[in-house]
Image (tube, grey):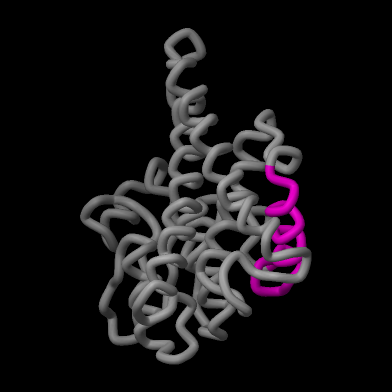
Amino acid sequence: MKLYGRYLSPFVRRVATTLNVMNQPFEQVQVAPFDEWDKALSVNPVVRIPALELDDGDVLIDSTTILDSLDEQAGTNALVPRSGKERRDVLKLVAIAVGAMEKSVNSAYELRFHPKEKVAEDWVERCDNQTVSALQALDAHAAKAGPDGWLYGSSMTQADISATVAFTFATLARPKLGVAEKAPNLAKLVARLEATDAFKQTHPSA
């Protein structure tokens, strides 16, 4: 398999980390849509990453769709429960984590692509507040789980992977938010997971 995108993107990283957790080998193909439009267009008509090219040549797009497909293939080793309340609960946590990613990205893009005098400061502040709110909601679950627990249940789920990726991205992209101090319990879970090979191999600095 080939995964298109850079690990600086939290959406690419959560797919890559999931592949590692599932022990699925893949080749990373570096591509940045803003700088390599044609290369990104060749795998996704929306010119977005990630895109995952399967061994049969089929290409999956959008991190949520990709992860759903990987879970389908994983069967009983899926990282999201198959049905019922457990599935709804985990998907809600994942949605909160993805929301934190989206809002952190929005803030970063606003600051990167607009001249300083044209930055919508109120928009950045709103996105930053949404990022913090999302991470603090996840922090409440981490607090209940304890230092060695998981956000949901007795084993790792996609909620843990996506929450960790969201937290680390916010830390790197918006350091002034001080998310480690505002979500200390989540910070402990993140530190635990970032120390594992599955996460080390996909860290934005890797």
Instruction: Quadrant for residue 174, please give it.
Output: top right
Query: Looking at the rendering, which quadrant does residue 41 occupy?
Result: bottom left
Q: Is residue 149 left or right of residue 8?
A: right
Please name the predominant secondary structure of the magenta segment in the image: helix
Residue 142 at what x, y percent from top left?
Answer: 66, 58
x 51%, y 84%: residue: 24
Q: Which residues are magenta?
A: 183-200
Q: Quadrant of the C terminus?
A: bottom right
Q: Is residue 194 magenta?
A: yes
Is 18 above or below relative to 33? Answer: below
Q: Nearer the viewer, residue 28 or 81?
A: 81
Dividing the picture into quarters, in which one does residue 66 lie?
Answer: bottom left
Answer whether residue 161 is magenta in the image: no
Q: In terms of depth relative to the viewer, which is nearer, 159 or 84?
A: 84
Horizontal and vertical percent position of residue 173: 60, 38
Residue at (68%, 53%) from the top-left corner?
Answer: 186
Q: Residue at x 46, y 67 (%)?
A: 90
Where's residue 191, x and y in %? 76, 59
Q: Residue at x 50, y 75 (%)?
A: 27
Q: Is residue 159 above or below residue 76?
A: above
| Residue 35 point in image, percent of width and height | 41, 42
